Image: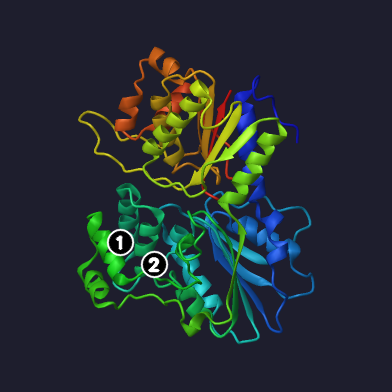
């Protein structure tokens, strides 16, 4: 695909890079090399995540036509891709709520556990896991209700906890996460195909690792709950303190013979974007695929780097593209008196911090977006920043600091017409950030 001219069409060029990153992570492009051979017995497909529907379709398209195949996966509402003409559906896809779980996700999780009962060593469980699976695959531990899980999830999301911390808690408050689903599949062989959306590509963190060992402990979960002042019901608190909600650990015979195949990662998508930039004649630099921290602060750091390149040609030579990925966090601040709570996600808040720190720097454009096409809970994937962002906002009486105070990135960039809207992409390798410095 021919790239737009980065000088004449900087926005379109950055969007071109974003789509190159997303294409690299699409399940149909990555699944074939990782599929096992059909077993002697049954093949049951289960799974959860924002890419679940697309992963199921990839398996259906690639699995031998005469080999038995059935199962169920759960994905986010409106994230099931259109079915290609002529592709028979053999795997049921259910949609449920993300990032806060709902009754549909609970029912799907119960059915998934039922599907893997009574299997033999001749059977195969193919588990399709992608980001978002923690909320979609919800089965509260004994003593917890769905309402409890919803409250705890909301508190974790607002706390500023990183994904590893959130998923440590989720694993210990679940009957299906943290390796427990693998235990339910015994004695069948389990092959997990996963798309990484976490820094470091740790399969025990992706979707809270339902089919892999968990090295974290009840004590770790308690420490995180205490750190972020999140309460759980007294019986659950006691069960955590007693270690009664412990997860299966590395070395457990439960996982003997199981396989985990990583079919797409954030680094691969960043490399695809870098390759597209170089094909257009630009230098391209990948900072990291593992960036974490407060979104607004990460934005300020990126701004400092872009200003150095724009003003001094250091540490990178312009024209260039600077790329990064990972999973930043947003701590929801108390709303100032008389203000309403804002809307937005990690990518938008990154862009607010970036715009504030760039201060209209000439020659710098940026796009930040989530690779699943949804930033937080709104319909946008992310937002744009350009040299005129602050000036256009100020002309409308909009102060970026006020929007930061309210965590209202969506409101800021919506009024400017600078939201990036792609719709669901049917994959998820987390944050994508690209800065174009001319």
The part of the image, by quadrant, that contains residue 220 is bottom left
* Residue bearing the label numbered 1: 148
Which mark, residue 171?
Answer: 2
Report the residue at 63% width, 33% height from top: 283
Q: Disc count in the image?
A: 2
Can residue 104 be seen in this snapshot?
Answer: no
The residue at 68%/35% (across/down) is 278
- Of pointers 1 and 2, the one earlier in the residue sequence: 1
The N terminus is located in which quarter? top right
Left or right: 105, with 427 as reference point: left
**Nearer to me, 430 or 85:** 430
Residue 397 % position (x, y): 35, 15
- The 10 Å Cα crowd at callout 2, few under 14, some 14 to 19, many 20 or more, is many
Q: Residue at x 67, y 46 (%)?
A: 23
Viewer-nearest of labels 1 and 2?
A: 2
Question: Element at badge 1?
Answer: helix
The answer to whether residue 28 is above or below residue 413 is below
Separation (CA) of disc 1 from disc 2: 15 Å
Residue 173, compared with residue 30, is above or below; it is below
Instruction: Tell me: 370 left or right of 395.
Output: right
Q: Nearer the viewer, residue 148 or 392?
A: 392
Q: Furthest-top residue in view?
A: 395
Relative height, residue 236 to residue 198 (above, below): below
- Image coordinates of residue 358 in percent, x first then y, are 43, 24
Crowd rating for badge 1 (residues with CA inside 10 Å; few <14, some 14–19, many 20+): some
Quadrant of the snapshot with the C terminus: top right
State the SS at label 2. Answer: helix
Label annotation for residue 94? none
Q: Can the viewer see residue 195 in this picture?
A: yes
Identify which residue is drawn at 20% across, 69% down: 234
Frontmost residue, 126 versus 435: 435
């Amino acid at each position: 695909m021919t790239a737009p001219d980065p000088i004449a069409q900087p926005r379109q060029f950055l969007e071109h890079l974003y789509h190159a990153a997303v294409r690299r992570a699409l399940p149909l492009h990555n699944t074939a090399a990782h599929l096992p051979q059909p077993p002697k017995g049954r093949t049951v497909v289960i799974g959860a995540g924002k890419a679940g529907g697309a992963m199921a379709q990839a398996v259906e398209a690639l699995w031998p036509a005469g080999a038995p195949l059935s199962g169920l996966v759960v994905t986010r509402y409106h994230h099931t891709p259109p079915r290609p003409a002529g592709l028979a559906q053999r795997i049921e896809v259910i949609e449920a709520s993300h990032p806060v779980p709902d009754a549909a996700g609970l029912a799907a999780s119960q059915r998934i556990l039922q599907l893997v009962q009574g299997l033999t060593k001749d059977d195969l469980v193919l588990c399709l896991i992608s980001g978002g699976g923690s909320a979609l695959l919800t089965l509260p531990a004994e003593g917890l209700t769905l309402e409890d899980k919803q409250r705890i999830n909301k508190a974790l999301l607002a706390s500023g906890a990183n994904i590893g911390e959130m998923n440590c808690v989720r694993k210990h408050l679940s009957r299906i996460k943290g390796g427990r689903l693998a235990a339910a599949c015994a004695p069948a062989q389990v092959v997990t195909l996963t798309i990484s959306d976490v820094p470091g590509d740790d399969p025990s963190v992706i979707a809270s690792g339902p089919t892999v060992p968990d090295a974290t402990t009840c004590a770790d979960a308690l420490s995180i709950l205490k750190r972020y002042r999140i309460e759980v019901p007294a019986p659950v608190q006691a069960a955590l303190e007693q270690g009664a909600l412990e997860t299966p650990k590395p070395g457990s015979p439960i996982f003997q013979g199981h396989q985990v195949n990583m079919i797409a990662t954030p680094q691969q998508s960043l490399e695809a974007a870098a390759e597209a930039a170089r094909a257009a004649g630009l230098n391209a630099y990948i900072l990291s695929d593992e960036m974490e921290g407060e979104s607004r602060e990460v934005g300020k750091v990126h701004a400092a780097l872009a200003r150095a390149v724009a003003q001094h040609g250091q540490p990178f030579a312009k024209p260039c593209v600077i790329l990064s990925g990972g999973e930043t966090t947003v701590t929801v601040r108390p709303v100032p008196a008389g203000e309403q709570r804002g809307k937005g996600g990690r990518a938008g808040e990154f862009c607010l911090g970036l715009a504030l720190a760039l201060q209209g720097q000439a020659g710098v454009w940026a796009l930040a977006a989530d690779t699943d096409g949804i930033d937080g809970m709104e319909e946008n994937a992310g937002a744009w920043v350009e040299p005129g962002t602050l000036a256009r906002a100020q002309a409308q009486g909009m102060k970026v600091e006020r929007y930061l105070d309210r965590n209202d990135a969506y409101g800021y960039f919506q009024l400017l017409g600078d939201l990036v809207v792609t719709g669901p992409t049917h994959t998820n390798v987390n944050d994508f950030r690209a800065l174009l410095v001319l």
